[in-house]
Image (cartoon, rainbow, N blue to C red):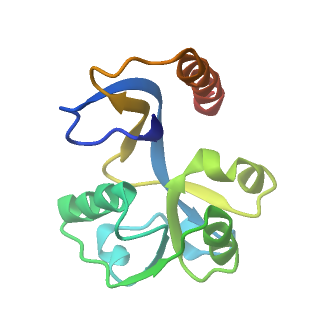
Amino acid sequence: LGVCLKPRDVSRLDCHALFEDELVFLTSPMHPWRTEPPKPKDFAAETYIISSKNSSTFEFIREYFLKLGVHPKSFIELGNTEAIKELAKLGLGVAMVAAWTARAEIKSKELCALPLPRAKVKRQWVVAHLKNKPVTLAERTFMSLCEEVGAELKA
């Protein structure tokens, strides 16, 4: 049983939808994109702060830039969302995350969430388990709790 982004190949899995989110650019309040929305030509020169190039999220990011015909050159990979937000606050790059991961910082104006221009990058979160494997009462209870949290996150 796992909480994850919906895999491309679900042939061996049963996936129960939790919520959908959308990636945004997360910047410091001093970043120039805050006052002047970026154009695709501006993207290549920016440093992007991401969780990992081996992640499903990076595949979404890579596809987004490919659709725009943009080839970013600089990435900072961090395995921790809090660290990603801190580097963005310091103006060391632009984070690409879901806004719900930085609600408090956006509300306090420590960070700015900017929509991705020209295309949206949406992700589907699921609880997945192997097909044909019975789900236990504890697992069903966990899935219900995940659904409740997912409903709060999309609000």
Query: Is 117 placed above or below 155 here?
Result: below
Kindly identify the residue that appears in the image at 43 percent across and 32 percent down.
Answer: 126
Would you say residue 35 is visible in this rendering? Answer: no
- Viewer-proximal residue among 19 and 42: 19
- Viewer-proximal residue among 89 and 86: 86
Picture quarter with the C terminus: top right
Kindly identify the residue that appears in the image at 37 percent across and 61 percent down.
Answer: 55
Kindly identify the residue that appears in the image at 58 percent across and 30 percent down.
Answer: 154
- Give the mark count: 0
- Viewer-proximal residue among 123 and 42: 123
Picture quarter with the N terminus: top left
Is 53 placed left or right of 101 in the picture?
left
Residue 28 in which image quadrant:
bottom right
- Viewer-proximal residue among 80 and 135: 135
Residue 81 pos. (x, y %): 61, 62
Is 106 placed left or right of 25 in the picture?
right
Query: Is 6 placed above or below 30 here?
Result: above
Kindly identify the residue that appears in the image at 23 percent across and 34 percent down.
Answer: 10
Is 87 placed left or right of 94 in the picture?
right
Would you say residue 150 is visible in this rendering? Answer: yes
Residue 78 pos. (x, y %): 54, 74
Query: Is 137 placed above or below 130 here?
Result: above
Residue 60 pos. (x, y %): 31, 55
Query: Is 8 placed above or below 109 here?
Result: above
Residue 9 pos. (x, y %): 20, 40
